[in-house]
Amino acid sequence: MGNTPATPRHGDDGILVTDLPGLLFDGEYEETHHDIRAVLFDPAFDPHEGLTPRESGKLTYERSRVLHAALERPLSMLRRPRRLFALAEWSSLLDPAVFSVLLVHHNLCLGTVLDLGAGRDDIKDHVEELDRLDSFGPYMATEFGYGNNVAALRTEAVYDAEAEAFLLNTPDAGAQKFMSFGGFEDIPKLAVVLARLKAGGKNHGVHPFIVRISDGEKLSEGVRVTPCPEQPVQGIDHALTWFDHVTVPRRNLLHGELGGFSSDGAFQPGGGNLRRRFLRTMSRIQPGRLCVASAAVGAGKASVYTALRYAERRMTNGPGRGEVPVLEHRSHQRDLFPALARVYAMNLLLNHAKREFLAHSGDTPDDLNHLISITKALATWEMSDVAGICRERCGAQGMFRVNRIADYGSLLHGLVTAEGDNQVLLATTAGQLIARADPDRSPVPPAGPVGRVEDAGAAGGDGPDVQVDLLRYREQYLCRAARASMAESEGTYFDAWNGVVNTALDMARTRGVRIALEQFCAAVPSLADAQDRTALRVLASLYGLVEIQRDAGWYLAKGLLTAEQVEGMPAAVDRCCELLRPHAGRLIDAFRLSPELLRAPIAFEDYAAAFQRQVGALGPDANPPLTPGR
């Protein structure tokens, strides 16, 4: 699988110099990723056929314990967010549900306890229980009838000052906690539950509480759980959870600086309004979104890695040439190489967002919130498309779960909704960007000729830089147009917003693509190897070209492209694919994946023999089983 990623260094011109793996893993592979990857070779992660949903779910919890036992404890990982992001990227590759269990436990549950209960000796036993994984930690925020609108949730925690306890109650069916994993009574669960705190006859807004769901033998008194219907891949115990006047000790309120209790036992809210306190309660959402994007990029890498490995070895007829690998066909390249470009683009966008997140402490500034939200939405959407394309290009083999890609597709469908439904998340971000736009600043069309857009794949061409300029102009134009339209609307604010929401979504998506392509362009000179620089520049050009082609009619209407250029784009895409063909292997080797790691038969050199071994169709002269490699 190539050499260990080089440690980044600075060249004579001050540019950080690295190799492709160093670029993709941001120079952190050995320190942050390598040991997590190594755990995945444990036999616990070998594929199992014919499991019932319950058996599959129980296996997920066993695998989660294997990872937990091999790595540092969650509290240590929370203090090194890059480790948390790396765990998200690798944990879903062999069992997508492991990602859900561990990242909810680590980030949402224990992370909330750490953020809002740090230094409290009275909950030390709960913290240690979760840190040891004696109990798994669900996070119960979303309600059945309210979806993303967590601020409007109806679960109540009413304070009884005399008993020094809260009564946690679900007032109606719509207020049941939805999708949290609480269905297995024989697995101990200690959850963080979000509820509306009521004390002294007043509503003090949404607060988190530590609540025992089950002790490993039975559900806690007053807790009722109804399993959700079976889902593809995510074979864990998602459920509807109902609280019937469950007693929660006063100490289990995670109030942080959001409030506290006076000497006479009365609850005193902290400073700020209900919205500020609610946002503080949801402190783990932004690192959670980066975890979701990390899992998405990991699944995208594995999908395109497997598809390209198979395409290199799957023979088909080549008119006039006899048998050739299916990857020699330009039609196959036309799907898989843009998919590869999107994986690189999202990886580099995500690296940028993670660096920006780690550079800030305290409250997250608006620009960073926007970047993280756009990264989460774009990465999960793009990688969902990539998994679908890769599954299809693998033909019938793509449908078998043992080849992984079908599972990645199901995982990604869930990630599109996780930590904020993409469309809602992107619309909220777009609205904020439009509201702060400068009404007096008109977008400036790209300066200079754009005639070489169609030559983006040419060595030394200026395609990616021109594409960035075009994307920036479209982003600014759409933002200004949406703002002007809202200002001119004579209806309600909702009417005005509803009239521009789709333009706003296009604007926010274009912003993400533009930032990703900028990161692509900036990465090219950082590579020490000339072939790597060539490969990455062509890949960046292909990504930008496909994105410009997506909205070619708009650019043509605005006079930024000519009809001849638009007509030439399909040929330009083909030219990029032709130039990328010799570099495909080195580009996917940088992912640090291997057939032995993924256990996907079609990724092996002799995929037919690997498939036979997997299904047990061994003849008397069959080769011995594959020895796991690293």
Image (cartoon, rainbow, N blue to C red):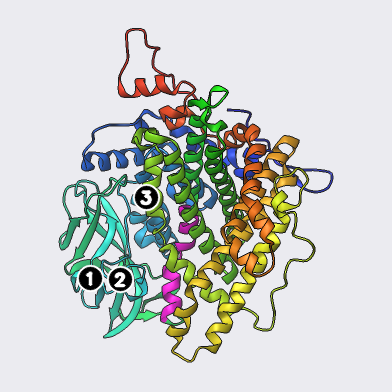
Residue under label 1, please give it. 174
Counting from the top left corner in percent of width and height, residue 328 is at 57, 31
What is the secondary structure assignment of the residue under circle 3?
helix
Q: Looking at numbered disc 3 in the image, what kind of residue is underneath it?
A: Ser
Classified by dominant secondary structure, the portion drawn in magenta counts as helix
- Return the residue nearer the eye: 446 or 346: 446
11 left or right, relative to 3? right
Q: Which residue is rendered at x = 38% and y = 53% of the image?
A: 413
Label annotation for residue 100: 3
Going from the N terminus, do you reach mark 1 or mark 3 first?
A: 3
Residue extending farthest top: 621
Closer to the chain start, of discs 1 and 2, is 2
- Name the foreground residue: 119 vs 202: 202
Rendering coords of residue 109 (x, y %): 37, 57
Q: Position of residue 47 (x, y in %)?
A: 33, 31
Q: Which residue is mark 2?
A: 146
Give, as a single range, the part of the protein colored magenta: 274-292
The answer to whether mark 1 and mark 2 are in CB contact below 8 A is yes
